[in-house]
Image (cartoon, rainbow, N blue to C red):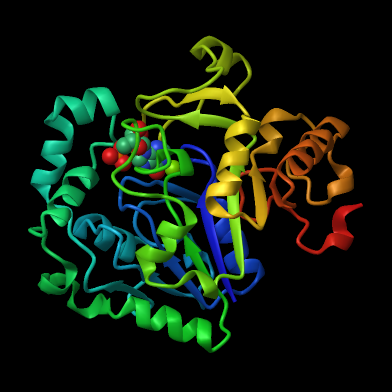
């Protein structure tokens, strides 16, 4: 059983929360991180503790789950080692030997290059410049790094073996559909494709092995860095509506806009979504906070969900109602709908 989970907008949709919920609820065997690299910040709030992950899969909350980082993902050795130590992941996390390395000078270039830092507004984490070096085939890869020796494995092989053994596998994408180098708002995008197909390629799994593609949308849209954002709210308006957020990695205030059905439709198409997760519905609708059953949602919240479903023609199966991993309405069993 393979589930691919990706962001439907500009990142920060709440992928970490959705992945961690499924990892625990479905007792997932294998969690794999896809995506660009440490530019991502996936937030998981589990048993009252907040984790801000940039490198390892959000599935770590299930202590039984094996964790992998796919060969397409960039690795920052310090960030990786910090997360391994902080979360005591020795012996349950592996990196593919072909993951390329982010080095100090990549970060410096990311921050000093005026196009990257001022126009695109990158995260400054060195991901774009490391991707450049990878394309030029001069980047170092993980199998050459002594410190990583104990973590190196053939991740594509392990993940395919797990799928073939009918284990439960979750591939976790990073960023969001419209930050894709190919499908996003170029040039205000990240340094590679971020759709479900790219997540598969990051890991080395073919499309026929996929059972479900979950596209995660937040109840409203946020974006950090440059680029178009339709119906963007002023900072004052965002504050007034309690929608102002700050970046997990950069601390920058996020730009805010209302949910955008046109973009959502396109994200469904680009990822061939089979399920939709909607997060932070409690931020839009008072009375939705920490609700776990659909019928207990306020009517306006139900109307919002039902409109998304009918417009996108894909079932909304998970609804986030708070920051904790299990603050969620799980509608994957259709009988729970009423
Ligand atoms: P880069 O990925 O650091 O090169 O940044 C390129 C663009 O993608 C900038 O607008 C960043 O703010 C945005 N970006 C990259 N990663 C994330 C993420 O995980 N969440 C939100 N925005 C991101
Ligand atoms: Mg984030």
The answer to whether 270 is drawn above or below residue 188 in the figure is below
Count of numbered labels shown in the rendering: 0
Q: Percent position (x, y) of residue 135?
A: 16, 54
Q: Quadrant of residue 100?
A: bottom left
- From the viewer's perspective, is 57 left or right of 84? right
At 77% from the left edge and 34% from the top edge, which residue is drawn?
Answer: 304
The answer to whether 22 is drawn above or below residue 187 in the figure is below
State ligand 2's quadrant. top left
At 32% from the left edge and 45% from the top edge, which residue is drawn?
Answer: 39
Q: Percent position (x, y) of residue 283?
A: 66, 31
Q: Is residue 48 visible?
A: no
Q: Residue furthest right?
A: 338
Please identify the quadrant where the N terminus is shown. bottom right
The answer to whether 338 is drawn above or below residue 164 in the figure is above
- From the viewer's perspective, is 206 left or right of 97? right
In the depicted view, which residue is nearer to us: 325 or 332?
A: 332
Q: Quadrant of residue 214?
A: bottom right
Q: Percent position (x, y) of residue 126?
A: 20, 44
Q: Residue furthest bottom?
A: 165
At 73% from the left edge and 44% from the top edge, which residue is drawn?
Answer: 290
- From the viewer's perspective, is 145 left or right of 316? left
Q: Percent position (x, y) of residue 296?
A: 87, 43
Q: Is residue 97 visible?
A: yes
């Amino acid at each position: 059983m393979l589930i691919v989970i990706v962001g439907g907008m500009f990142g920060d949709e709440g992928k970490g929360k959705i992945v961690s919920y499924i990892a625990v609820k479905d007792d997932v065997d294998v969690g794999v991180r896809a995506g660009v690299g440490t530019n991502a910040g996936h937030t998981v709030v589990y048993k009252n503790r907040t984790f801000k992950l940039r490198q390892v899969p959000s599935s770590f909350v299930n202590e039984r789950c094996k964790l992998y980082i796919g060969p397409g993902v960039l690795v920052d050795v310090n960030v990786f080692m910090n997360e391994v130590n902080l979360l005591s992941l020795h012996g349950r996390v592996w990196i593919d030997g072909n993951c390329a390395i982010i080095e100090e000078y990549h970060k410096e270039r990311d921050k000093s290059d005026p196009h990257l830092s001022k126009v695109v507004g990158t995260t400054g984490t060195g991901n774009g410049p490391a991707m450049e070096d990878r394309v030029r085939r001069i980047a170092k890869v993980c199998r050459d790094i002594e410190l990583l020796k104990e973590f190196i494995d053939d991740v594509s092989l392990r993940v395919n073996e797990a799928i073939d053994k009918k284990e439960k596998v979750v591939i976790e994408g990073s960023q969001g559909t419209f930050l894709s180098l190919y499908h996003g708002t170029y040039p205000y995008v990240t340094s590679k494709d971020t759709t479900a197909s790219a997540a598969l390629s990051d890991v080395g799994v073919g499309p026929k092995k996929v059972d479900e593609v979950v596209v995660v949308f937040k109840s409203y849209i946020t974006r950090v860095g440059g680029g178009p954002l339709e119906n963007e709210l002023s900072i004052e308006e965002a504050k007034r509506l309690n929608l102002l957020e700050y970046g997990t990695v950069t601390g920058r205030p996020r730009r805010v806009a209302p949910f955008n059905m046109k973009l959502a439709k396109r994200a469904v198409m680009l990822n061939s979504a089979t399920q939709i997760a909607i997060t932070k519905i409690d931020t839009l609708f008072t009375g939705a906070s920490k609700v776990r059953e659909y019928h207990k949602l306020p009517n306006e919240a139900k109307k919002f969900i039902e409109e998304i479903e009918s417009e996108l023609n894909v079932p909304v199966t998970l609804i986030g109602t708070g920051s904790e991993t299990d603050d969620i309405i799980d509608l994957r069993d259709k009988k729970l709908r009423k």
